[in-house]
Amino acid sequence: MNKTKYIFPFPFDKCRKGANIVLYGAGKVCADYLYQLRGKEYCKVIAIVDSDYQNIRSLFDIDVVSPEWLRQTNKYDYVVIASYQFNDSIFTDLINLGISENRIISAFPRGVVSLSTHVEDFIVYAIFNILGKKTFSYIDIGANDPYNGNNTAYLYYNGCHGILVEANPDLIEHIKKYRLIKRWIVQA
């Protein structure tokens, strides 16, 4: 299997072969997981769980059900969290529904929060991770705030380094103070 084909690789190493699974979340991660599992006899997806299940049922050829459905059946071995953005809240919801922690699988660590506006930092980091690059360099043009909505802060805290370009002098001072920049900050 070509691992670089998917932005979000399915956590095969955490899921027993032959298991019946439920995917929780119906976004991009779910689509990647379904694509990787189609045609394989590794495990069987018996349903997709999503809080917006009524509006998205027609988008899938698998049953899309409410989170409450998990309480009403025991036909699954694992619930695989298929969302990086809502990983923590889904985990908490599952525990509150009475799902045992050993039946919950996630490829994403809990307690990790994206700092960029649309999770671009996680996506970039995941792509480079798949390519075998744990650290890399970047150029952030329009760096803005050192954390809020920043596309490189998460990368920075995971060992990556780069050049930040920012036109606003007030933000430059803020970036210098909080991102511990030692070399270059380019004022446009």
Image: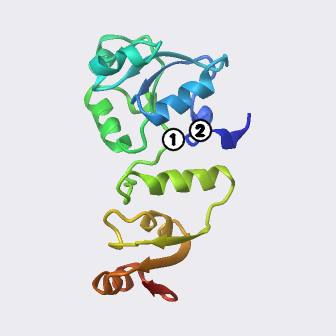
Q: Which mark is residue 107?
A: 1
The answer to whether the residues at label 1 and label 2 have Cβ atoms under 8 Å apart is yes
Q: Residues within 10 Å of mark 1 (few under 14, many from 20)?
A: some
Q: Is residue 7 left or right of residue 59?
A: right
Q: Secondary structure at mark 2?
A: loop
- In the picture, the quarter occupied by the C terminus is bottom left
Q: Which residue is mark 2?
A: 9
**Earlier along the polypeptide chain: callout 1 or callout 2?**
2
Left or right, 174 with reference to 184:
left
Q: Pick the residue in front: 125 or 73.
A: 125
Identify which amino acid the numbered label 2 is placed on.
Pro
Question: Which part of the image, by quadrant, shows the N terminus?
Answer: top right
Display coloring: rainbow
In the figure, residue 85 lies in which quadrant? top left
Image coords of residue 174 (percent x, y) = 31, 82
**Labelled disc at residue 60:** none
Is residue 87 visible from the viewing direction of this image?
yes
Q: Residues within 10 Å of mark 2 (few under 14, many from 20)?
A: some
Q: Residue at x 59, y 38 (%)?
A: 9
| Front-lying residue, 143 or 72 | 143
